[in-house]
């Protein structure tokens, strides 16, 4: 199965290269580096995915046509070039390093032995399964679809699930996304030593993997955006507004929190352009173009969820006032979060890259590379702004030490590419150049070295790198995940579903909602984050499937005053889940239709009207 998954990922790489090459031609861009072209193709596919989902056509055959068309475009492009790119001898060391890291990841985690029993099973497995069945990721009001993601990652996961078993679902991010990060880092500079060091940094920075939402894919998009503005072989005096708009839209469609990068990067790129061109009008036109392209490519994904957004605006659910624990936001803290990571490691790696980017721009400001390195300095400001911005927002999210993991895609995407671009431009003495570059670039590697070895050992021995190590290494938990993904679990889930008449809506809070038949019944899956969305509406009657005897059983109701959350959003999620469970537990006029000892199917009816 690993070989089949790798073959599919190779086909996707070729297809995205084809679509990216076409995008370059349509946007009048130079050829550039092939990994950046692949990222542009990925963004193009996501834009097409928004249209397909909006039209309810995002089913297997449509994805296959998109894949085959991309491969055809790649063949056309390679034929037009007349030959494959020549690989220099000095590049083989970097290529070998990338290959070893990707092969190790694939061999140990494709498929992984464990997934997140809550986030993945209740959300990220459901979204692509629904899409392939119905043609769209559009979901009910109790799903996080439309809030925590717009559906782009689910669309990409659909390529895998249309051809491979469900346990391979994370191949697109954990392996393909990692490959793209390493490839972009390796080609952001012509200096082979800097390229190799950037690859090591990208792999060493701990991703704090807790679910299959976009992580390495998001990092690859950020990395490509910086390569387009500051990369040695990609830089143009006027940054390509359509390309940056495309990448910004793709990032936001994968994960709305990436809006922070999109806004900062476009703003800082425009600032650097204003300084280098000394033209306010040109800068205004460029900014308007970049924002306009981003909105154009993002519009279909927004339109998919527009009914929810309108409902949340016109008739929001009653607001709750979070009661959260106070927490010191220690941006340079040495304390560990629940995954054993320390803020100082990320802050130290961030400051190293920021210092390198700013120093290179300063010392080379009068050279021909000055405008390009000014863009590198802009990217350094984006990196610092992302770190401190997320720290400032953490009380509204999940608290600082939990929210620290939201920074990982920013760190993996920006730190390595900044090091690759800046290190060769720093004014080291010739005799000290190599040792100095190695010393600076190894700072992120050294900071994360203890966790890096733990990740490698966990991957090799247990077949996953989930950050909640104690649970992820537990044989009972690994067995539970395997059982939930087995064909028997699908059969068991659909047997319970068949209790409900075909065509009638079902509200489901169960272990395996992704195994439900989305064509037989309209499914309203209930996930914790979805309950906290402004448009969430819990129906008062109808069919309900509830899990009550399992490792992820529905929890008993409790008073939300006793919650111990350190962030407002996290508190709201828990409070709304408690209220949902309490509503189910207290429901009157409820009849049990089926109970297999783990899951119960209920029919709730409204009380008869009093005459």
Image: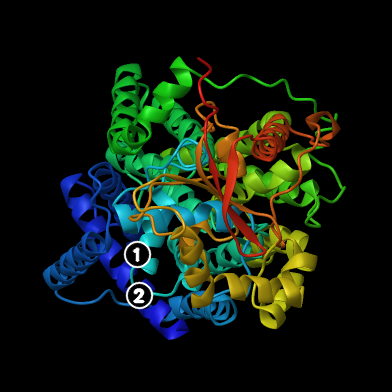
The residue closer to the viewer here, 150 or 100, is 150
Figure quadrant of residue 463: bottom right
Q: Are marks 1 and 2 in contact (CB under 8 Å)?
A: yes
Judged from the image, the secondary structure of the residue bearing numbered disc 1 is helix
Q: Earlier in the sequence, mark 1 or mark 2?
A: 2
x and y percent of residue 508 in the render? 53, 49
x and y percent of residue 541 in the render? 51, 35
116 above or below 413?
A: below
The residue closer to the viewer here, 177 or 55, is 55
x and y percent of residue 365 in the render? 50, 37
Residue neighbourhood size for the residue with mark 2, other residues' Cα within 10 Å, grouped as few (<14), some (14–19), many (≥20): some
The residue closer to the viewer here, 435 or 556, is 556
x and y percent of residue 362 in the render? 57, 38
Query: Residue 8 shows which numbered tag?
Result: 2
Q: Which colour scheme appears in the figure?
A: rainbow
515 above or below 508?
A: below
**On the rendered image, what quadrant is the N terminus found in?**
bottom left
Q: CA distance from mark 1 to mark 2?
A: 9 Å
Figure quadrant of residue 475: bottom right
58 above or below 367?
A: below
Residue at the spot of label 1: 159
The residue closer to the viewer here, 434 or 599, is 599
Figure quadrant of residue 248: top left
The tally of labels here is 2
Residue located at (64% from left, 35% from top): 587
Tell me, yes or no, if residue 192 can be seen here. Answer: no
Residue located at (69% from left, 58% from top): 552
Residue neighbourhood size for the residue with mark 1, other residues' Cα within 10 Å, grouped as few (<14), some (14–19), many (≥20): many
Q: Nearer the viewer's eye, disc 1 or disc 2?
A: 1
């Amino acid at each position: 199965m690993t070989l089949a998954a790798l073959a599919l990922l190779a086909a996707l790489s070729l297809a995205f290269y084809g679509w990216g090459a076409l995008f370059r031609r349509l946007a009048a861009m130079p050829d550039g580096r092939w990994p950046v072209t692949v990222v542009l193709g990925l963004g193009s596919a996501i834009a097409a995915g928004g249209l397909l989902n909006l039209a309810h056509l995002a089913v297997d055959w449509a994805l296959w046509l998109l894949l085959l068309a991309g491969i055809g475009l790649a063949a056309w492009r390679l034929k037009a070039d007349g030959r494959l790119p020549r690989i220099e001898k000095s590049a083989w060391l970097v290529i070998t390093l990338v290959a070893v890291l990707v092969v190790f990841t694939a061999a140990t985690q494709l498929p992984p032995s464990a997934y997140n029993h809550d986030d993945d099973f209740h959300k990220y497995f459901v979204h692509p399964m629904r899409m392939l069945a119905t043609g769209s990721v559009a979901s009910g009001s109790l799903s996080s679809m439309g809030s925590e993601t717009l559906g782009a990652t689910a669309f990409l996961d659909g390529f895998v699930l249309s051809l491979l078993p469900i346990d391979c679902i994370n191949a697109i991010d954990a392996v393909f996304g990692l490959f793209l990060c390493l490839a972009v880092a390796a080609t952001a500079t012509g200096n082979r030593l800097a390229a190799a060091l950037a690859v090591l940094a990208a792999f060493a920075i701990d991703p704090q993997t807790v679910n299959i939402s976009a992580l390495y894919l998001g990092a690859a998009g950020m990395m490509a955006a910086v390569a387009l503005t500051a990369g040695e072989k990609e830089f143009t005096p006027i940054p390509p507004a359509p390309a940056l708009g495309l990448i910004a839209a793709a990032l936001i469609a994968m994960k709305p929190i990436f809006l922070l990068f999109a806004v900062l990067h476009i703003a800082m790129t425009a600032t650097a352009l204003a300084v280098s061109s000394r033209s306010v009008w040109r800068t205004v036109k460029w900014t308007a173009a970049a924002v306009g392209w981003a909105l154009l490519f993002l519009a279909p994904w927004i339109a998919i969820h527009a009914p929810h957004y309108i409902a949340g605006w016109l008739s929001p659910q009653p607001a709750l006032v979070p009661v959260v624990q106070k927490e010191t936001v220690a941006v340079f803290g040495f304390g560990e979060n629940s995954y054993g990571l320390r803020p100082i490691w990320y802050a130290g790696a961030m400051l190293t890259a920021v210092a390198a980017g700013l120093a290179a721009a300063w010392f080379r400001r009068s050279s021909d590379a000055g405008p390009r390195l000014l863009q590198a300095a802009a990217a350094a400001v984006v990196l610092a702004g992302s770190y401190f911005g997320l720290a400032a927002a953490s009380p509204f999210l999940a608290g600082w030490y939990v929210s620290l993991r939201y920074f990982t895609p920013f760190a993996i995407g920006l730190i390595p590419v900044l090091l690759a671009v800046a290190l060769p431009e720093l004014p080291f003495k010739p005799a000290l150049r190599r040792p100095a570059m190695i010393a600076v670039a190894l700072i992120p590697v050294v900071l994360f070295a203890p966790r890096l070895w733990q990740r490698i050992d966990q991957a090799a021995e247990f077949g996953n790198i989930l950050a909640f190590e104690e649970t992820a290494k537990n044989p009972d938990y690994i067995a539970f995940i395997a059982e939930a993904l087995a064909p028997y679990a699908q059969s068991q889930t659909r047997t319970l579903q068949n209790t409900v008449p075909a065509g009638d809506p079902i509200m489901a809070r169960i272990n395996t909602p992704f195994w439900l038949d989305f064509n037989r019944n309209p499914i309203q899956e209930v996930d914790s984050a979805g309950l906290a969305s402004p448009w969430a509406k819990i129906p008062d009657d109808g069919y309900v499937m509830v899990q009550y005897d399992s490792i992820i059983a529905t929890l008993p109701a409790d008073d939300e005053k006793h919650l111990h959350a350190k962030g407002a959003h996290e508190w709201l999620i828990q409070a709304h889940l408690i209220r949902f469970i309490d509503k189910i537990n207290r429901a009157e006029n409820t009849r049990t239709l089926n109970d297999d000892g783990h899951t119960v199917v209920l029919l709730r009816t409204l009380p008869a009207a009093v005459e």
